[in-house]
Amino acid sequence: MKLLLQIALTLLRARLKQTIVAAVGVTFGITMFVTLLSFMSGLNKMLDGLIGNRTAHVRLYNEIKVSAKQPIKLAYPDTSAHHFISSVKASNARLEIYNANKILQTLDKDERVLGYSRRLSSQVFFNTGASDITGFLSGIDPEKEVSYFHFEDYITLGNAIDVKQIPNSIILGKPLAETLMAEIGDVVQVTTPNGERFQLKVVALYQSGIADYDKTQSFASLSTVQKVTGKGNAYITDIQVKLKDILMAPKVAKEYGGIFDLDAIDIQAANSQFETGTQVRTIISYAVGITLLIVAGFGIYNILNMMIYEKMDTIAILKATGFAGRDVKRVFLMISVIIGLVGCAAGLVFSVLLTTAISKIPFNSAAVPTVKTFPVDMNPIYFVIALVFTFATTWFAGWFPARKASKIDPVIIIRGK
């Protein structure tokens, strides 16, 4: 094997330019493969963060819906009859979660639950001059929102905890604050659907990156919203649950929905379209990267084919001096693998340099204020995939020419010379 390796290196040096061209092709393929996957993975994580960080793994609530048992069905229970009902209205069921304390105690004992946050959401009107702007006011537990839902990451100005420490305070979405021309320390007037008016002090500005959401959304402490809406201290409309394992969300949601007689939705169901987009982007990235490596493999294949035609006499001499066909095959396989591994090593180095450079490029977007540079995720698994796929591609690229070289008849070649 040592002798065969020396012969392979000698043939590589004899065709140095072609060897360099083939190695550069592999280097380019590996560089773009790792860089593309790292950038796309970083982009997916950023987009997932915009939704996933602020979305509960399981949301417990009461949904407004039509009653399944209509009066006519109770009056005429005959199963053979068909009931014609028109203009069906939703029932007068309350949005409040009953026995909330018991539910929270159950969540505290569940080892699958990482944490939870109570919420009370209400539609309100923000008064600016003679105009009223429709919006939503959410009562939150600031400490738990910061701990489990990264709430602080989306505060562009001010402090999230101030909304609890300062009485009658509010956090406005940044686009909403611009519409109201409100800044930190200003007082905004809020009107409830019942016609009650309250003045709340702005202590922070919030921006999630979802423009339509930020134009209408505002936050206050749970006690403040309970006071604004005229509800008691135990009144809540949502429980946002964070699990230790996000993959358990569908199972836990179904379980909690049945136990507590509440509507429960998991994060996968709530963001199914978004997850589909993430999967499509990942598939496209892998497809483009693998295509680049396959193209580089064809380059090695063509160069080895040309080398065989040019080195017919060398192959004939090797076989005439006692080298078997399998030895010749090993020589050309070594040539292919050496080109691939050298190109792969150089490609990995360049990919690290390129992804590092991309991660330093400023990324300033009003929609995503928390992201300052282009998102890049250099996962070590990408380097392993690149190395394995390069070895496989170059081995197959060299196998066919090597097989052809091993079958050359030295007598025919020498007689022709």
Image: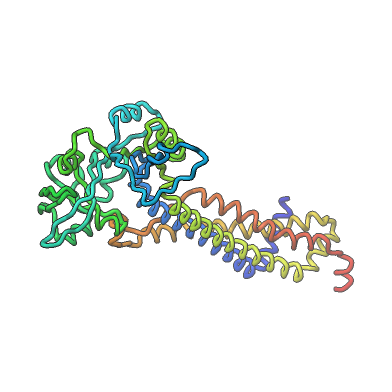
User: Residue at left 37%, top 47%?
Assistant: 52
On the image, which quarter does residue 144 sit in? top left
The reply, left or right, for residue 145 in relation to residue 334 is left
Residue 278 in picture, x, y percent from top left: 46, 54
On the image, which quarter does residue 289 sit in? bottom right
Q: Nearer the viewer, residue 85 or 45?
A: 85
The reply, left or right, for residue 199 in relation to residue 222 is left
User: Residue at left 16%, top 55%?
Assistant: 126
Residue 42 in picture, x, y percent from top left: 42, 54
Callout count: 0
* 219 up-or-down from 357: above or below: above
User: Residue at left 56%, top 54%?
Assistant: 386
User: Residue at left 63%, top 60%?
Assistant: 339
The reply, left or right, for residue 172 in relation to residue 389 is left
Residue 18 in picture, x, y percent from top left: 64, 69
Q: Nearer the viewer, residue 232 or 24?
A: 232
Q: Is residue 197 visible?
A: yes
Residue 277 in picture, x, y percent from top left: 46, 56
Quarter containing the C terminus: bottom right
On the image, which quarter does residue 100 sit in? top left
Q: Nearer the viewer, residue 32 or 138?
A: 138
Q: Is residue 203 visible?
A: no
